[in-house]
Amino acid sequence: MPMKTSLLLLVLAGCNDAEDTGLDVGLKRDDLGKITVGYDGFTDELTFDVPAKAVSGLIDCQDIGDQYTIQLYTLYRPDGSIAWTAEEPRAHPYRADIQMDISTVLIPESPDLDIQSGTWTAMFNTLAAYQNTLDCQATWRVDDVDRNVLDLDIYLVGLRGIDASNAADNAGIRAMLAETYRLWDVAFDAGTVTYHDIEDPDTWSVLDIGRGTTAYVELNDLLRMADAAPTRTVPVFLVKEIQDRYGDVIYGISGGVPGAATVMGTSRSGVVVTAGDVSSRPEFVGHVLAHEIGHFLGLFHTTDEKGKSWDPLSDTPECTLDYDVNGNGIMNSDECREFDAYYLMFWTGNDNTILSEDQTWVVERNPAVR
């Protein structure tokens, strides 16, 4: 059965140093204050200063609410040049999809748009005519990019016979993690894995993505339970099953591209994976987890399901609708074999493992990686 993953895209004034906030010494966090959403749906301009030593940064603006959408509209570099604009989304080596509740902006998303120190300017569009305010902050990674380590905080959600007391010794969990870290060996080593139980796990064990105004509410509420400390980690929720609005199984979903790296307790703070069968096919679950971690750390699908959107990287192939042999409007693995079907971040598949140099470059710099 091919892997089916879901990418949440509707894709979903002061300055405090690490010593003052309890952050890892390789991070720095700036409070950017509030921005106002006007009746036209556009926000004030948000300015933020990139430190000279920063290798990456995550800007997050919250909380607009689960029922509302938000998208980065413009992003300008310190020299005044355009880094990205929603008016010409394919004109620059960046991508910013529509999200819900929180906007997460990762810099850089590509080696072709490297981070520059100085003052950047951003504006957002909520795609709705109502007035609101958003709280914004920036988290900068200021340590060196060398051989990296990725820590995981795993939340056990209603898996039969598996909880925080025994997960580290469970054969299925161990094999799952071995596969995940094997696939990402080019970018980072296995780090510390910490296990957590959640309150009332049976309530959340079958996660319903929902539809209409309730779409993603359960997902958002589950991800808000991520309270790991230290925050330089990827929160992973292993549930029995994720279901879409038709009752079909979704194997994995990330809170966003990018996720809210190092920011806990938000609707973007982690990934969720269907793991009810982790004991019987742990490598498959590990493959799904590796794919979702890629999304959380800033990687888009190399080619999306309908062949109309791709990642912003210059070294990953694109499979277009020109190769939709059966004409059904869906780019399957067979149709894209000569292009990107073997890439880990292709939208579906269970034997795709390739990571490009640019993909590795992006992930290595994410603030969640140490």
Image (cartoon, rainbow, N blue to C red):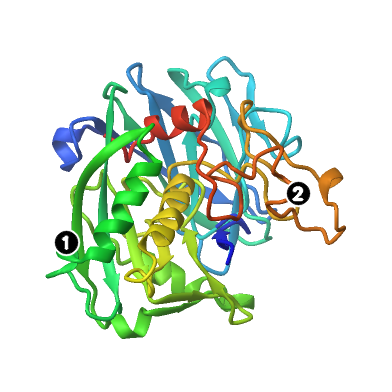
The Cα atoms of the two marked residues, 2 and 1, are separated by 40 Å
Q: Position of residue 39 (x, y in %)?
A: 66, 56
Secondary structure category for the residue under label 1: helix
Amino acid, disc 1:
Ala
Asked whether residue 15 is in view, the answer is: no
Q: How many marks?
A: 2
* Mark 2 residue crowding within 10 angstroms, few (<14) / some (14–19) / many (20+): some
Q: Is residue 162 above or below residue 29?
A: below
**Residue 120 versus residue 267 in the image, above or below:** above
Residue on which disc 1 sits: 168
Point 19% across, 73% down: residue: 163
Q: Which residue is mark 2?
A: 335
| Quadrant of the drawing holding the N terminus | bottom right
Query: Which residue: 62% across, 77% down?
Result: 211
Frontmost residue, 50 versus 175 = 175
Q: Which image quarter: residue 265?
A: bottom left
Which amino acid type is shown beneath numbered disc 2? Answer: Glu
